[in-house]
Amino acid sequence: MADPDWRGGAYEAHGVRPEKGLAVARMAAHITYLSEAALQRKFGRELQRDGLSWGFDAPDFQVESYLRHQGASFVDRFDANSYLYITRALDYFDLTASHDGVLANAFRRARDVRFCVLSFSSDWLYSTGESRDIVRALNAAGCRASFVEIETDKGHDAIFLEEPVLHSALRGFFESQASRRGLA
């Protein structure tokens, strides 16, 4: 919204797009998808080229180049107002709001559903603590829930990467559901 081209959200009417602001927003958000260990392993302090530029126009470090690429490619795929509305919807969402402030009440009508809650130990966006809160609420509501915390240093992006424990846990959950229903 600080990008002068945002124009209070009416950028299309002015024939512009707030590309710089959206790119910076994506770069900042992208850092939260990876853990510190994953960023260190992937980039460390590797330089983009020989020597430091001592300036700000060109990236000196590979991680800077990577984040700039993520920001630039996001601008081509996403609308700034859509991004703002989606993030605001995520901020406003409160499952307990219509259930007397009690998470377990949100699950009371789901007692016949079997839940599998997975978390990644290094996920900053959806922490293991929050996942455990969901499992406790499911149990308090009388629901059957499985929980697996997957030890990984890949952060939130672990869901998209090769994580054998994830695949094994999901396979076991789906197979148990299929055999319970006589489908296996």
Image: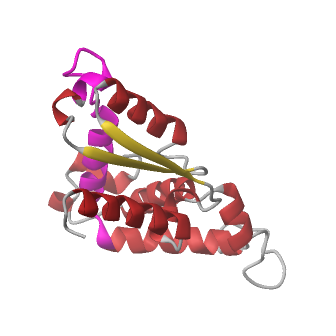
Q: Where residue 76 appears, x then y in whole percent? A: 33, 74
The image position of residue 80, as x and y in percent, is 30, 57
Q: Is any atom of residue 45 visible in this view?
A: yes
Q: Quadrant of residue 15?
A: bottom left
Q: Is residue 10 left or right of residue 20?
A: left
Q: Quadrant of residue 45?
A: bottom right
**Rendered view: 161 above or below 116:** below
Residue drawn at (36%, 41%), measured in percent from left and top? 145
Residue 171 position (above or below residue 31): below
Colour mapping:
secondary structure
Quadrant location of the C terminus?
A: bottom left
Residues drawn in magenta: 77-106
Residue 91 on the magenta segment: yes
Question: Which of the two residues, 62 or 100, is positioned nearer the viewer here?
Answer: 100
Magenta: main secondary structure? helix
Q: Is residue 68 above or below residue 124?
A: below
Q: Residue at x 40, y 52 (%)?
A: 3
